[in-house]
Amino acid sequence: MTNEASLLYNYLMVGGALFALGMIGFLVRRNMIVMFLCAEMMLQGVSVSLVGWGRFHGDWGGQLLVIFIVTVAACEAGIAMALILMLAQRSGKLDATDWQQLREEGQPAYVDREVPEDPDYKEPVWPTLTPAGIEPPQDIEETLHRSRV
Amino acid sequence: MRDAIDTWLTLIPALPLAAAVICGVLGPKVLRHQSHWPVILAFAGSFICSLLLLRDVYENQRQLEQSGAMVAGYEHVTNLWTWAAVPNAYDLGETIPGDGPTPAADTGWRNFRIDITLRADALTSMMLSMVTGVATLVAIFASGYMHGDRGYWRFFAYIAIFVFSMTMLVSVSNFVLLFVFWEAVGACSYLLIGYWYQKPEAAAAGKKAFLVNRVGDFGFLLGLFLIWSTYGTLNFHDTQANGDVVAVATEGSADAAAAADGEGGLVRGVLGQSRLKANDFVTGGLATAICLLLMLGACGKSAQFPLHVWLPDAMEGPTPVSALIHAATMVTAGVYMVTRCSPLFGASPEAQLVVAFIGGFTALLAGLIALTQFDLKRVLAYSTVSQLGYMFLALGAGTYAGITSGMYHLFTHAFFKALLFLGAGSVMHAMGNVIDMRQFSGLRRLMPYTYWTFLIGALALGGVFPFAGFWSKDAILGSVHDKVHAIDHELEHRSGHGKDHGDDHHPATDGKTHIENPLAHWSDAQLARYSKIYLALYYVGIFTAFLTAFYTFRAVFMTFFGEERIPPQAGHHAHESPPVMTGPLMVLSVAAALVGLIIEFGSGLFSAAQGNLLSWWLGHTPSLATGVVAATRVPGAFHLDVAALSTIVAVAGIVLAMYLYLGERVQAERLSKAFNLNSNGLFGSPYKASLNKFYIDEIYDWTIVQPLRLLAFIAAWFDRNVIDGLVNLTGWIPAAAGSLMRSLQMGLVQFYALAMVLGAVILIFARLMYAAG
C-alpha cells in the first residue's frame, strides 16, 4: 500500500466512523439538539472523506466541495437551531417524540413504555454530608424562567 | 377610371368599418349620445361612393358596348390581398364533368388561393347603392328613435358592422368570402335582434334567428363544397393559373382571355366570363344538388318556407334594425345570391322549379298568416316574408325577365318596406313602445307625417298604380306568366314538328357562342307538368297580391283610422315624431312613389338604355349577359292583362279591408267568427290556424326542439353520471394508493430517518451488486 493510499484509508476510516456514529446517534436519540448535532457529525464525516479523496487525487475539488458544504451547513444550522428553539418554547421539551401528533390521522400513538417497577427496588441511601455554609437564596426570577426546562 | 373604381369599391365597405371601430372605441366614454355622427357620415360617404361607382360602371359599360367588345357583360375585379395560398393544393384530375372537351388548364395539380377580391358589375353596383342609401336613411331615423337608449353607441357600432358586412357580401367575387360575410351579416343580425338583451323575448329571438340560420348556412356550406369539387375553383371571375385576376372586359378584348386559354393558363371561374361564353356548366343531378343546397342557404337568410320562422320573431329588435336588416337589406342576401348564381340554376330546371315553388308557397303562407296578426310589426314581418317569396317565385321562373323582375322587386321593396317599418317605428315611438294594433287607432290626425308616408308605403306594398310595388309585382307576375307561355309554346312547337328532343345538342365551345333554348332538353311530359305548376304558382301570386293589399290596408285602417285611442303607456306626450325621424320617412316615401315610374319610363335618361331601366342595367352583369339566362331574353313587354288583373285584386283587397276595418268592425268580428269553425280543434279553425301561424313553431317545437331537448337531457345525464364518474374514479385511484401508505406516517422522526437510511443502504447495495455483477 502506497503512502497516499494509506493516507486515504485513514481519512476514510475517520470519515466513516464519524458518519456511522452520527447516524447511530441520530437514530437512537430523541433530543432534538443532539439529533441535530449528530446530523452535523454525519456531514463532517462526509467532509472528511471528501478531503481525503481530494488529497488522494491531488486536486482541490474535494476541499472546494467541503467549503461549500460547510457554508451550507452553517445556514442549515442557523435555521435548524431556530426551529428547535421555537419547538422547545412551544412544548417546553426538546423531545422529538413530543411532536408525534403530526402523524397521519388514525395512526396509533407511540407511548413510551414505563420501565416496570422493580419489586426489589429500594430507595438508595445516599451518604449525607454535613451542610457546609449557608444555602444560597433562590432567585425567583430564574426559577420562573427555567421552570419548564 | 380603373383606379377610381378600385377606390370606390374599397371605400364603400371601409367607411362603415372605420365608423364601427370609432364607435366601438370612443362610443362608451367620449362620443356617448353623439355616436350616430361617425356612422351617418360614413354611410353617406359610402352612398356617395356607390353612386360614383354606378357612374363609372355605366361609363365603362358604354365604352365597351361602343367598341363592340361587350361579349359577356362587364365586370371589374380588384384584388386587395391574398388571404390564403396553398401551392399544389389539390389534383383536379377528371373532376370537371362539363359537356364540351375539357380545357387542358382544367386538369392537373392546381394552387389553392383565396384572394380578397371585390368586383364591380351592374348587379353589385345596384345592390351597393340600395344598401348604402337605405342604411343612411335608417341611421338618421335611428338617431332619433334610439335617442336616450343606454346602449346608444353599441347600436350604432353594430349597425356600422352590419353595413360593412353587407356591402362586402354583395361586392366580393369569391364564394368563400361570400360565405364569410354571409355569416357576418347573420352575426350582426343576431346582435341587433338581441340588442335589448335584458328582455328575455329579445334574447330568445336572437338565438332562434341564429340557430335557424345555422340550418341554412349548413346547406350553403355543403353547396360550396360541392361547387369546389365540381368546378375546382370558388372564384366568380376567371383567373390565371397562378390565381391572378384575368381582366377580360376592362382590357377591352376577349382575345386576351382566349390567348390565355390557349396557353393553358386560364382557370375558369365558377361564374367567369369564359365559362359563361362556353356554357361550361355541370348539368343533371349534380347541378340540382348544388342549387338546392345553395337554395337552402338562401331559405335561411331570406326567411323562406321551412326556415322562415325566425323573421317574425326578429321583430323584437329595435325597429330601425327591422327596417334595415330584416326588411330591406340582409334578408335580400338570399335573393342576391340566387341571382348571382343564376347560371348555375339555369343548368337545373328542377332546382328552378323548387325555387319557384318555395317562393310561391312562402308568399301564400306568410300572406295568410299576416291576415290575422295584431302586432303591426309582425304584419310587416310576414309581409316581408311574403314579398321575398315573390322574389324567389320570379327567380324560380329562371328566365331573364324573371330574374331581373326578382331584383326589381328587391329594389323597390327595399324602399317601401323600409318606409313601412320606419313608419311603424314612428308609431311605436309615439305610443310608448306599444305595437298591438288593438290598443290604438285613429292616429292620422295625431301623426300626419307618419300617416301620409305610411299610406304611400302601403299603397306601394299593396301594388296600386303607379307606386313602386305595382310595377315590380307586375313584372314578377308577368314573368311567371311568360314562363308558362314559353313552355306551352315549346309544347305546341313540338307537336307540330314531331318529337325533337335535341339531346344531341352540345353547347359550342369553339368560340362561337351558341346557347340553345333551355327548354329544348325537356321531355314533353316534363314540360306539361312544369307548365301546370308554373300556372298554379301564377295564380298563387295573384291571390297573394290580393292578400297583400288586404292585410296592408287592414293595418293602415286599424292604426290610423277610426276614433282616436292612445294606450296608457304613451302617457300624455303622444306626439308626432321629430323631424329627424319624419325626414327619412319622407325621402323614402318619395322613393316608394317614384322609383317604379323612373325605372319603367326613365330609359330616356340614358342614351343606351331601352325598356325597363333596371332590367337593362342588370343585363350588363356577366351572369345575366350571356349564357342560358340571356338566351331567354326577350324584348320587355308590359303585360296589360296581368297588370289589370293584379290591380283589380289589389283594389279588391283594399276595398275589403275598408269594408271590414273602417268603422265599427262588426263585419270583421263576424268574419273571424265565421272562420273560427271549430274553436276547440287544433286545426279545425282556419282563423285560429292563421292567428297561430299555422302552428309551424309548435310543429318545429315538437318535432325538432323537444326531441333535441330530450337528447340533451340524456346527454347531460350521461355526462354527469358516467363521464364524471370515470373522471372521479381516476381521481380516486391516487387517494386509494395513498391510504395504503398512510400507516407509515406515524409522526416519529427516528422512524423516518431509519426508513431513509434503509433506503440508502438498499440503493448502495444494489449499486455494489451492479458494479460487481
Image (spheres, coloured by chain):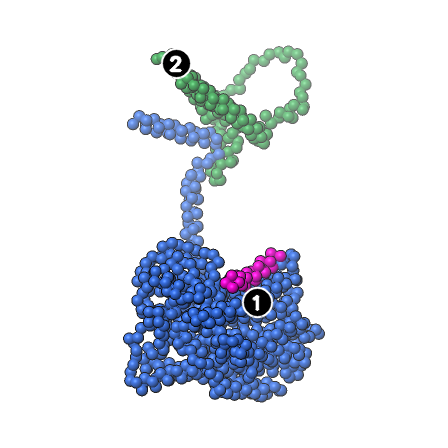
**Left or right, B605 with reference to B246:** right
Asked if B500 appears above or below B309 in the picture, the reply is below
Q: Which residue type carries mark 2?
A: Glu
Chain A colour as displayed: green
- Please state which of the two labelled residues, at mark 1 or mark 2, is closer to the viewer: 1
Point out residue B363 in the picture as x, y percentages from the top left corner: 48, 78
Tell me if residue A132 is in the magenta stretch: no
Point out residue B179 in the picture as x, y percentages from the top left corner: 45, 63
Q: Secondary structure of the magenta portion, mostly?
A: helix
Residue at x-position 47% and y-position 61%: B78
Residue B132: image quadrant is bottom right
Residue at x-position 41% and y-position 48%: B730
Asked if B496 appears above or below B365 in the picture, the reply is below
Tell me if residue B4 is in the magenta stretch: yes
Chain B colour as displayed: blue
Point out residue B322 in the picture as x, y percentages from the top left corner: 56, 70
Chain letter belonging to callout 1: B
Q: Which residue type carries mark 1?
A: Phe
Measure the C-alpha gap from mark 1 to mark 2: 100 Å
Chain letter belonging to callout 2: A
Q: Secondary structure at mark 2?
A: helix
Q: Which mark is residue A4?
A: 2
Residue at x-position 69% and y-position 75%: B575
- Residue range (magenta): B1-26
- Camera-side residue of B497 and B277: B277
